[in-house]
Amino acid sequence: MSKLFNDQVIICNCGGTMDIDGKKLAKACGSTTPCDVYTSLCRNQTDKLASAMMTAHENDRQLIVACTQETATFDAIAEEHDCAPPTTVNIRELAGWSENSASALPKMAALMRQAGDSKRPGLSLSMISHGRCLIYADAKRPNGGTAAALELGARLNGTLGVTVMIANAGNGIDASADAGLVTTGSIRSVSGHFTRFNLVIDKFSEAAPHSRSQLVFGTLQDGVETGCDILIDLTGDTPLFTGWEKRDGYLRAQADDSLAMAKIEREAMQLIGEFEKPIYVNFDETICAHSRNKIDGCSRCLDICPAGAITSLGDHVNIDPAICGGCGLCGAVCPSGAVQTAYPPADQLLASIARLLDYYHDAGGKNASLLLHDDSYGREVIEMIARFGRGLPGDLLPVSMHAIGRAGHDLMVGAIALGYKQVFILLNPNKAAENEPLIAQRELAEAMLTGVGVHTANQIMLLDDVDPDIIADKLYDSAHKPKGKSAPFSPVGTPRGYTRLAMRGLATANNVKQAIIALPDGAPYGRVNIDTDNCTICLSCVSACPAGALQDNPDAPQLLFREDACLQCGICAATCPEKVIALEPQFNLTDSAMAAELVVEDTPFSCTQCGKPFGSTKSIETVIAKLSDHSMFQQTARTDMLKMCEDCRVEAMFAQNDKTMDVGERRKPRTTDDYLN
């Protein structure tokens, strides 16, 4: 840290709009070099910035500039001097422009230090668009967009390969020579993604080339299959996709909205060439608890995905990375960790949250709260609050996420355990369907925190207000008195793993004696209660359990259970032929939850012929009792066969005169001649 400022970090107070004491800031960052505070690095002090860039380049260091607004200007200066572009960090809207700016210095220091942290690069999917663009309108709808579609087609034609398709075209549509290929048709179904939309079209026909003043269409056809790279919907009808905002390449607007139409034109112009789409989730099908042996289990990700990117595929699910919009909800609700967000990974995100708090404390900050927001709507709201309102509180540390849906109970509990006094989650009020799952996640987190003695009112707040001023007031005025002690930990591994670390740490720090915490229905933690008197130890549940929570002993007829592995998916209860299994959501803080406990055992049943153990006494006796009234087992000899191992049973079947499978002489087939003669 001794060479931090002017060598690795350069500060600008944005024309004097932020009161930054360079000496105090340097001290807060633990730097021995002074912090020169500039006023206009993007205009009349660009020489200072260029000098810092060249120094960083010569020393092979990363330069951090405390300004994000002028990133394009900084990149141009770097290119001019043949230097790497600097990393930028926003200390203005996030800290400096605030009514608490006088106490925001620790937050500024923390944000700058965090900007220098290394990040693991994510994976991406390569996609190639050839610019095949379909513009869809409907002549029968009041704002169906026929004229707008033809006009937009004329603007895009040449840059893109444009087809304009007008549903219910009829007569009276003016011909256009510039709009590309003009057709009529109604989309029956559509699937796929950007660069590969697949459509089935009814009542399809191309406009005749001899169309003069008005379009003339030929014979209509149904079931025409086609595809396109870009799909523009101007019908004003129901969107063609659920969660359409997240479907890349599907652009939608009201035809009479000139601003939206101009935006679509700009976006469509850019959708040709090769693209790298981030892979938002990693999926491990081996631990997916969706289904076993055609018995349904967990369907949380299927039920919650707003983009339709997740489909059922036998015993597990399939996630199409080309469709996935990265909302993060699947990672928040997946009980096994089979679906893990990868942009960034959940453990990396929580580790970043932990480091930010450490930097804040190192700089002298106290009693920090956490604000989770997305990098689109949330960022805009924060800018509005900073420019026209109170700004963010000085002790509120903001963390940007690609999408707020990943803010599950594990992050909420983890943040409180790390030492944040409060967690605020900034929601987009226009996406109620995506916000609803987070309500259940908060309830689960609150139940868990209550169990370890640290939950209080307003500890975890979901902010879905429309007015930025109301949001700012809640950030400042929400009454909250921290309760209990924190328990910092290293957030590594799976969400279940670091959540357990956080919970056990909080329980120990606050001297919690209660070992079992009751959780709401649907929680991904708990145990299975087994009626041991009626369990036959058939072990069907063991073979069906996707997480290995139910286990057997290969050397003895025993059923074992490991609670920390149980996902509460319910496959075991649905599989059990005796229906003796019930789920109980709870969180077990004891060490015993991580070990396999003996649930029920029985004595081995030995073959009455050779003496080889081949099952449990309970299971054999249950089978004999159930078959006692069956017509095939009224003879003692046949019942005795049930007490034999598989080898001896076969020998006994062939040794009997009245063989079980003996059906006698087969009847001769009768023909027409038999009846005529």
Image (cartoon, helix red, strand yellow):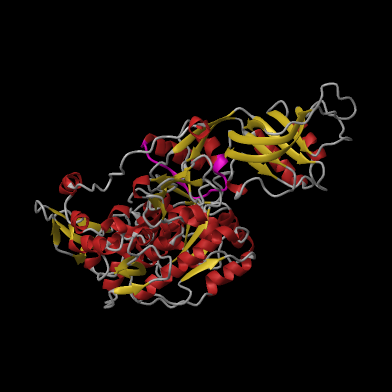
Residue 477's spot in the image, x, y percent?
Answer: 54, 75
Q: Is 64 contained in the magenta span?
A: yes
Q: Is 308 contained in the magenta span?
A: no
Residue 507's spot in the image, x, y percent?
Answer: 29, 72
Left or right for 383, reference 607: right
Question: Which residue is more in the foreground, 609 or 672?
Answer: 672
Which quarter of the picture shows residue 487? bottom left
Left or right for 244, reference 88: right
Question: Which residue is more in the foreground, 530 or 99?
Answer: 530
**Can residue 559 be seen from the camera position used here?**
no
| Vertical arrangement, residue 610 with respect to residue 665, above or below | below
Left or right for 210, reference 183: right
Question: Which residue is more in the foreground, 25 or 267?
Answer: 267
Residue 563's spot in the image, x, y percent?
Answer: 28, 64
Left or right for 230, reference 2: right
Total of numbered circles in the picture?
Answer: 0
Q: Which residues are magenta?
A: 59-73
| Vertical arrangement, residue 459 with respect to residue 221, above or below | below
Residue 92's spot in the image, x, y percent?
Answer: 54, 56
| Vertical arrangement, residue 484 with respect to residue 118, above or below | below
Main SS, magenta region, reads loop
* Farthest residue, direction left: 611
Q: Residue at x 58, y 65 (%)?
A: 464
**Can residue 240 be seen from the camera position used here?**
yes
Q: Residue at x 45, y 39 (%)?
A: 53
